[in-house]
Each structure stands twice: as structure tokens, then as C-alpha cells.
């Protein structure tokens, strides 16, 4: 189907629900990171119920007198009911269910668009299936008693869902990008974009290792010793911290290439400048964690900044491809 003749209302409707879903996923990442930073990850020691109930208790008196023995037999020897932590984790689960509904709605609205872009519909349904897998991984995280490797896998799946949704969303925006040609773009931009993406992947991998190390230190030294965790960090923590400067400089150069060749108003330039702001937040929050004793409230901010950076770079890449392909078609290089 010719994109120019496709109903704009259907595309706009899809873009709205896909954007809302994407923002909700990022919100869930923030909430999940807050749950973990607050120590509420095992606020509900079972799944999908919470202390054996669909609506968790509000006081310890509502549980069996031997509930600690029950959960000790299941492998959770240190289970102790805490109403605040229990309800924090329960709300986290409710948000996850809400996102499942939103992604299902996104998949349904993508089906009429399959003639406009089959890959859009496939990606939308793939994201829905991935959310089901993410729910299963969430159950495994609980059953593993928050093992670091399972937590990291759970996080990587969240990033995969973000990437899949962004791919679908960018497919629905290809008409928008086609109206913004990249005829004068600096020839070095594609190479530097690839470099920036690789640097970000390396930084995220090291960041996941640091995250796992904080879980280990939390168990060995206790939350009361957070200010001492930095001293016990291995070498990759310091590489991760220093590597952020290289990531920042590479992205600044990428932004300069776009500003100089496309100007300030092009969508690619604005996305890249937004990316720089996100990197700034990531660097500042990382420095705060490293120099102020790993404050609990900063950890979720640092994680969301890192995942937002990944999302923005992926969107820039897809938007560039749509603009470039439109230019190639307009020149008649593709029949």
C-alpha cells in the first residue's frame, strides 16, 4: 500500500497508544528499580499471589502464626512481613499487569496497519509475547530469591521490549521522517552513530556487572554499609565510571555533526540533543553514586537514564534509516 494514501487517523491512533505503552514501560523500569533499591524485592515471597493472597495483607496478624516456617521450607529463610515493602512490590506487579493490557491494545491496533507495514504489526505482537515471557522471568526472579543473574536477565528483557516497541513506533513514523530529508547530512554521521551505539552497549554491559556486584555487597555487608560498598568494588566499576566520559564525548561529537549539517530544527538533531541531556543525567547520577556512598534514591534515576539513552539511540538510528531510504527512493535508486 502507498504510505501517502494510508488513513492518517489510524496511524495517529496507533502512535498514541504505542507512545503511551512505551512511557509506561519506562515507568515500570523506574518503579522496579525503586523496589529493588528500597529492598522491597521480596516484599511478596510468592508469585502470582502475595503471601498466598491475591490482595496482600496489611498486618502480620492476617498471616498464619507459622508463616515464616512455611516460607523457610520453600527456601526463603529470612521472610519477615513488612507492610510497606509488601505493598510496594504488589503495586509494582499491578503496574506490570497494566502494561500487559496496554501492549495487548497496541498489538490489536497494529493489526489493521499490517498492509501499511507488516513489520510494524509483527513487532507489536512480538512485544506482547515478550511481556508474557517477562512475567515468567519475574516469577523466576522471585523463586530464585533475587539472584543477581536472574535480575539482570529480567532487565535485559525489559530493554528488548523497549527496542521492539520503538521499532514498531518508528515504522509508524516513517512518513514523518520522509518529510525531513537528510540530503546535507555529514557523511561521517552513520559511522559515528554505529560507534556511539557500540559504546553504549559496552557501557550497559559493565553497568549490569556493577548492579550485580551491589546485590552481592548488600548481602555480604548489609544495607547499613552502603557508604563502604565503593571500596569493595572490583576493577570494572572504575572502568565503567571512567568510560562514561568517552560515551559523553562521542555523543557530543555526534550532535555537533548533526547541528552543523542539518541545523537545530531537524528531528534527528532534536533527538540527539535530548540524548545529550539524558547522558548528562546519567553521568551526574553515576558520579553521585560513586562519590556519595551509593544513595538509595539515585539508583533508580541512574538506571532509567541508561535505559532512556538506549531507547533514544535506537530511535535515532531507525529515524535516520527512514529519512535516508526516503531520499534513496526519491532519487530513483530503488524502483
Image (tube, helix red, strand yellow):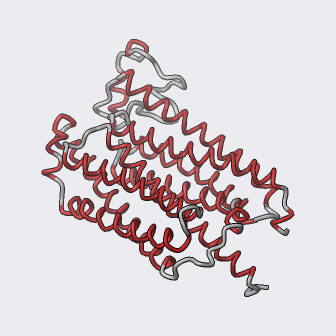
Instruction: Compare residues 200 and 176 and report the one nearer the observer.
Output: 176
Residue 139, position as x, y percentages in the image = 48, 43
- Residue at coordinates 25% horizontally, 39% vertically from top-left? 295
Q: Is residue 172 above or below residue 20?
A: below
Residue 72, position as x, y percentages in the image = 32, 32
Instruction: Compare residues 107 and 323 and report the one nearer the observer.
Output: 323
Residue 155, position as x, y percentages in the image = 44, 52
Q: Is residue 166 visible?
A: yes
Q: Quadrant of residue 37?
A: top left
Q: Is 129 displayed left or right of 66 in the figure?
A: right
Q: Is residue 186 above or below residue 214?
A: below
Q: Is 22 displayed left or right of 144 in the figure?
A: right
Residue 174, position as x, y percentages in the image = 70, 65
Q: Is residue 284 above or below residue 203?
A: above
Q: Quadrant of residue 7?
A: bottom right
Quadrant into which the C terminus falls: bottom right
Furthest residue toward bottom? 333
- Residue at coordinates 42% horizontally, 58% vertically from top-left? 276
Q: Is 241 displayed left or right of 15 in the figure?
A: left
- Residue at coordinates 51% horizontally, 77% vertically from top-left? 190
Total numbered badges shown on the rendered structure: 0
- Residue at coordinates 48% horizontally, 30% vertically from top-left? 90
Quadrant into which the N terminus falls: bottom right
Q: Is residue 197 visible?
A: no
Furthest residue toward top? 61
Amino acid at each position: 500500500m502507498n504510505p501517502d494514501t494510508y488513513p492518517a487517523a489510524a496511524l495517529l491512533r496507533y502512535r498514541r497508544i504505542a507512545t503511551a505503552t512505551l512511557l509506561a514501560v519506562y515507568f515500570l523500569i523506574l518503579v522496579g528499580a525503586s523496589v529493588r533499591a528500597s529492598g522491597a524485592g521480596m516484599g511478596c515471597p510468592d508469585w502470582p499471589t502475595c503471601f498466598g493472597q491475591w490482595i496482600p495483607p496489611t498486618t502480620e496478624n492476617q498471616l498464619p502464626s507459622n508463616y515464616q516456617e512455611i516460607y523457610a521450607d520453600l527456601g526463603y529463610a529470612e521472610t519477615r512481613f513488612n507492610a510497606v515493602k509488601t505493598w510496594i512490590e504488589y503495586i509494582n506487579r499491578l503496574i506490570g499487569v497494566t502494561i500487559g493490557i496496554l501492549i495487548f491494545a497496541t498489538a490489536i491496533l497494529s493489526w489493521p496497519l499490517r498492509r501499511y507495514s507488516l513489520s510494524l504489526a509483527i513487532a507489536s505482537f512480538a512485544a506482547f509475547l515478550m511481556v508474557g515471557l517477562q512475567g515468567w522471568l519475574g516469577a523466576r526472579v522471585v523463586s530464585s530469591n533475587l539472584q543477581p543473574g536472574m535480575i539482570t536477565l529480567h532487565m535485559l528483557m525489559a530493554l528488548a521490549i523497549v527496542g521492539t516497541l520503538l521499532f514498531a513506533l518508528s515504522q509508524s513514523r516513517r512518513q514523518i521522517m520522509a518529510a525531513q530529508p537528510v540530503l546535507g547530512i555529514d557523511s561521517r554521521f552513520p559511522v559515528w552513530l554505529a560507534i556511539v551505539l557500540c559504546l553504549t552497549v559496552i557501557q550497559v554491559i559493565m553497568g549490569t556487572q556493577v548492579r550485580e556486584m551491589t546485590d552481592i555487597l548488600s548481602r555480604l555487608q548489609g544495607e547499613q554499609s552502603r557508604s563502604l560498598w565503593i571500596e569493595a568494588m572490583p576493577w570494572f566499576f572504575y572502568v565503567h565510571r571512567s568510560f562514561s566520559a568517552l560515551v559523553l564525548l562521542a555523543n557530543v561529537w555526534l550532535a555537533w555533526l548533526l547541528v552543523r549539517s542539518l541545523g537545530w530544527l531537524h528531528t534527528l538533531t532534536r533527538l540527539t540533543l535530548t540524548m545529550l541531556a539524558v547522558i548528562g543525567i546519567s553521568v551526574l547520577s553515576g558520579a553521585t553514586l560513586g562519590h556519595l556512598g551509593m544513595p538509595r534514591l539515585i539508583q533508580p534515576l541512574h538506571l532509567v537514564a541508561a535505559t532512556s539513552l538506549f531507547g533514544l539511540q535506537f530511535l535515532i538510528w531507525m529515524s535516520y534509516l527512514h529519512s535516508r531510504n526516503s531520499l534513496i527512493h526519491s532519487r530513483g535508486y530503488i524502483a
